[in-house]
Image: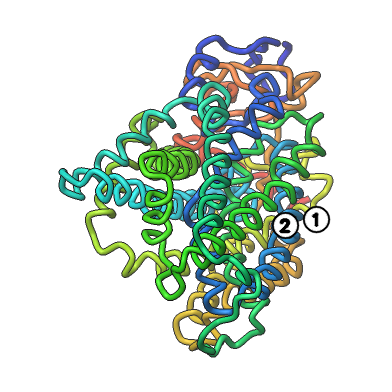
Amino acid sequence: MLAVGRNLAPLEVSLTDDPQVVKDAATEDYTTHVVPLSWRSSKKSLSMSWYSLVSGMFYLVTAATLAAVVGTTNTVIGIVLACAVFGLFGSIISRYSTKTGLTVALISQRLFGASGSIVAPLILAATSIYYAVFESSMIAHAFHASIGFLDIRIWYAIAVAMNLPLVMGSIRRWMDKYNAILLPIYWAGLILVVVLIARGNDTAGWLAHAPETSIPLSAPGWLYAFFVYLGVLVLMMFTMDFARFGKPQDSRTNGIVIFGPVFYLFVYLANGLIGIYIAYAAGLSGEVSSTAIVDTMIAVLGGWGLLLVWVTQARINTANFYEASTNLEGLWTRLFRIRLPRVAAVLICGAITYLFMLTDVLSYLLVALAWQGAFIAAWVAILLVHIFLSRTGDRHGLPEFRPGRLASFSAGAWIWFASAIMGIALYQFGGSVGATWSTPTTFVVAAAAYASAFTLQTTSVLLRRADDPRDEVADIWEARIKCHVCEHSYIAVEMDRDPSATGSPAICTACASLSTAHRRACLAEHTAAATTSIRT
């Protein structure tokens, strides 16, 4: 490949994957890189990995708890509305993720700037760990209640340790196969629980269950139920990280079946109805809790019930630990400018999860999730608005995400922080009205503010840089360019020129994020270009 521009070092281009990069991807999964088309997964493989999120005690308990507060009818209306909204959002975000191949961390650089984006992987990693704490606690409780001869703290350690090996591989090499085996067991087990409960209990009228006492909710019951589900918008961030492995030609099917409305009919509606049925048909009204539902499953199925609980929690924890470890890996790299191997990230997440389990986690878990939920709601709103207003991308039909071409902070970063802080304040100090309306209010405010400032956001975040490697190859998705730092080849989509080195040789996104010299040189180039433009 011939060099273009000002005495540039020639690019080392190839049209096949770097063998070492492919080997690393077996565990690293392109965590800090764009996913090339050659590493994309089939619809079946991707669906099995993503559908690990279908199983979770959280969904059963949430629906049963809401039914106790607002009644079954209102709960079902709220769930159906949540399926429609989440299905639409998931479809939009999955198609965008497939098109760009970007993670939450990488797209956040475009939205909030090279430095402003660092909060996004931090929040996603923390939220994923909190969910892992909840699900792992259910596994530990089930084993302790059924077997019991070990201290609960030992069962906590066992519950965490059982999950970690399952997420040390890539989505397409292990998670899909593992979850494909367990998915039928999950649904068969739940159906069997329902059938056995129906034989020995009076189940008439469970769909018409009304709350025994009235609680001020500051919203109609069905809307309150919908707002509760809206607090789980973190699934949209999960979608961004998983859908990047989809094949472009499968975008429509994936957007409907895997990440869209079909998925949410299973995860919210089917799980919700089963959760309500188990809780109330089994006579657990007034005692709705995760442990009560676990105990009921074990009581009905015996040893098979223990297997069902393990399958339920282990499946969803593969997704929780995967998200936690990949985002921790990216966060560690950005903070300490040292690469953290994926296996090490998984072990750190496991250790943090176990330490949280040893504390009175439920006393602060819900508050922590509410605070993080404000940032997540604002992030999702901003991303959706960005997708709508930036359909043609910045260059080559893509958003600019390369750290050497972005300012440290953008107008979007301040909008994100301000709207999230407003949501937290509303939740903390707004009484029942604030607690109920904080998430939708945060979402609307963030979306409106970002839409209003979109032009300013774009001009404030994009640096003026010349000599783009993308312009030097015929196909940015097929050409691989060697990085002068790590000496590995990645697709041209993510490659940049490094003005801190002689001849501005090519540098990959991951190495660019680690180099302070590269950052300083890019900012200097931008300043010089801006000054020249003003003079002319």
Please, what is the three-letter code of the amino acid marked with disc 1?
Phe
- Is 385 rendered above or below residue 323? below
Query: What is the number of the mark on residue 384?
Result: 2
Q: Estimate the x, y position of residue 337 in percent, counting from the top left.
A: 39, 37
Indicate left or right for 135 with 102 as reference.
Answer: left
Please give the count of numbered marks on the rendered protein.
2
* Residue 239, percent from left and from top: 63, 45
> Which residue has dot 1 on it?
388
Q: Which residue is painted at 52% across and 58% down in the image? A: 60
Q: Residues within 10 Å of mark 1 (few under 14, many from 20)?
A: few
Q: Residue 504's image quarter?
A: top right
- Lateral position of residue 331 relative to residue 449, left or right: left
Q: Is residue 402 visible?
A: no
Q: Quadrant of residue 286?
A: bottom left
Q: Are marks 1 and 2 in contact (CB under 8 Å)?
A: yes
Helix, strand, or loop for circle 1? helix
Mark number, residue 359: none
At x 64%, y 80%, the residue is 221
Q: Is residue 504 above or below residue 193?
A: above
Q: Nearer the viewer, residue 291 or 164?
A: 291
Question: In the rendered structure, which amino acid carries the disc numbered 2?
Answer: Leu
Is any atom of residue 150 visible in this view? yes
**How does the figure colour the protein chain or chains?**
rainbow
Between marks 1 and 2, how big is the CA–CA gap?
6 Å
Q: Quadrant of residue 206?
A: bottom right
Q: Residue 453 in the image: state x and y as whole percent.
A: 72, 67
